[in-house]
Amino acid sequence: MINVLILLLILILFSLSILGYGLLLNNKFFKLELNTGEHGLIGFFILYLISVFFNFFISINIFFSLPILSLGFMFFIIFFFKKKNIFFDRFDFLILFLGILSAITINLHDDHLLYQLPYIDLKQQFKIIFGLIHLNDTLAYQHGLYDTMSLFNLPFYQNRFVFLIPVIFVMFFLSIIKDKINLEKEGILFYYCFFIVTLFLLKFTRSKEFGTDVPVIALLFLIQVYSLEYLKNRNIENFYKMIIFSALAVFYKLYAVLIIFNFIIFYKEILNFTKKIFQKKKIFLFLIIFGFSLTFTKSFINSGCLNYPVALTCVDKNLASWSIGKEFATYRSDHLKASIKGWLPYVRSTNFNDLIMPENYLKKFKFNFHKNVFKDPDLERLLIVIITVLIIFFINFSFNYKSTRNDNYNNKYYKILLCSGISCLLWFIILPHVRYGGYAYVSFFLFILMNYFFSFKKVNKLFFISFISILVFYFSAKNFKRIDKEIHSIVDKKIYNEFPIPVYKDIDYKKMIKKNINFNISKHKTMCGLIPFPCLPFHYRNLDMTISEVNEYKFLASNSSQRKSLLIEEIKELNDFKRGLSGYHDNLIIKD
């Protein structure tokens, strides 16, 4: 029980510290009308910039991060007593309860030892590393949220609470959506927010699922909500909010760029709005440009690519010795594209008899890959989205069965139908997995389309409260059942005594000297976990790698052709295809 209380106190401390930075940035610079949740997400924006910028010059160690955390809490206290746009109601405390329920777990994301914790740990130990990609190319993916998480290192506990940060992000998001729900008003905005709350309470019940993708999905939903608000009130502040949260979403994951089509609704006002930004919001514009500069510079230093693994953005090794090069980036890009477009479902459907390689799969199923995508369990997630949308439509129709075609469906809605349709179509062609924005792109398009045929009217207040209460009960019951199951499945005494504070698994390793450099070779075939730097997974133990140091900056380089060959070998192994079924790597431990 004491550990649950500690978890709750740390979650509150982190939340208020993040909120403090949002209050500071908005009250001193942005000067927008924001609610508590929006201030919280603005806090995430500025903390991302702080983490990435300072890591160019120093490590994000506890001597840096602890004062950052303390300052944020101090800012919150100052603005709280000044009563600067801070308000918590009973629903915020309900969101806090649901957040802590989802956070009580030792069952972390499948990739927490593959790249999540290693990336955070390396940021805390070293200044930005040139060629970080050569240790493990997944470390060079876009890790915006993990940059922020690296700031939350605590004495004694170190990084054992960092996975509360995605939970806090979702809590701030739900607080924003809660404030958008007005039972006294009708229209698509209310029902879309109703849908979002329903989806999150039904689908996202475990913090294990709160990697980088769920916060990005939350931001996409939020941008869509601001689009609907703008069509309703023509308030320029919705434009500003869409810009800053679109930028944050892209900082976290590049696939969020598809949301840019929502800005079509501003095509008449875009020049006027941009002029106002230059005149009155210069700091706003500066921070957006600064954020993109930091993001692409960080990626280039880590990988030699402005955005790895997009090969067109990579430079050759003769220009940047630490670069991974275009050849390897192309191969990894093909691997990721094939994975998104149904490669593993196809291999599983053949009983692993056709172990086709990713690049060959993309050629074989260049235009008909969707038939394999539909074999993926991801289809179930898409069905959940569609079913949830239909449930909300049914609720609206039940209370407004006489409702006919929406006579208010004018030109402004045709614009947003166009932009949502483009985003949804491009998602379906390029990134047909719901985790890559499908939750938001598909549902928004369906809502805008159905708004053409039906008017969205008021819902009965008692029904709405009862419906949400049932969902909250479902969410709570599912988590209580999960927590009980987790507790009874623990066999390690230390883990049991520490529950629900996670205890990270140690991976055994051995030392190897290569070119007068002491390497730590993991006894896990594909990952290093928290093994001290420099570590190579067992599969890559013979990789030709060099490490040098200039002005305390580490420069890594390796033979990209050899790395590509090793990656191909890894992919060819049957166990890696089976790993696609299980999603984890426990069957890859090397025995002495």
Image (cartoon, rainbow, N blue to C red):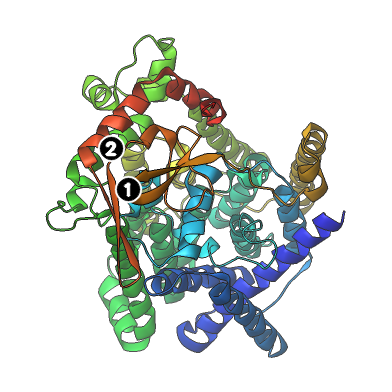
Estimate the x, y position of residue 325 in percent, counting from the top left: 20, 47
The answer to whether one can see residue 453 in this image is no
Residue type, mark 1 in image = His
Q: With respect to residue 571, does 327 lie above or below?
A: below
The answer to whether one can see residue 95 in this image is yes
Q: Residue at 46%, 21% (x, y): give it.
A: 575
Estimate the x, y position of residue 492 in percent, counting from the top left: 77, 37
Please tell me which residue lies in front, 37 or 413: 37
Please tell me which residue lies in front, 432 or 567: 567
Q: Earlier in the sequence, mark 1 or mark 2?
A: 1
Residue extending farthest bottom:
82
- Picture quadrant of residue 155: bottom right
Label 2 Cα crowd, 10 Å radius (few <14 / some 14-19 / many 20+): many
Estimate the x, y position of residue 296 in percent, counting from the top left: 29, 62
**Numbered disc total:** 2
Please tell me which residue lies in front, 582 or 242: 582
Q: Residue at 67%, 79% (x, y): give it.
A: 86
Element carrying mark 2: helix
Residue type, mark 2 in image = Arg
Label 2 sits on residue: 563
Q: CA distance from mark 1 to mark 2?
A: 9 Å
Residue contact between numbered discs 1 and 2, judged by CB atoms under 8 Å: yes
Q: Which mark is residue 134?
A: 1
Q: Residue at 56%, 55% (x, y): give it.
A: 187
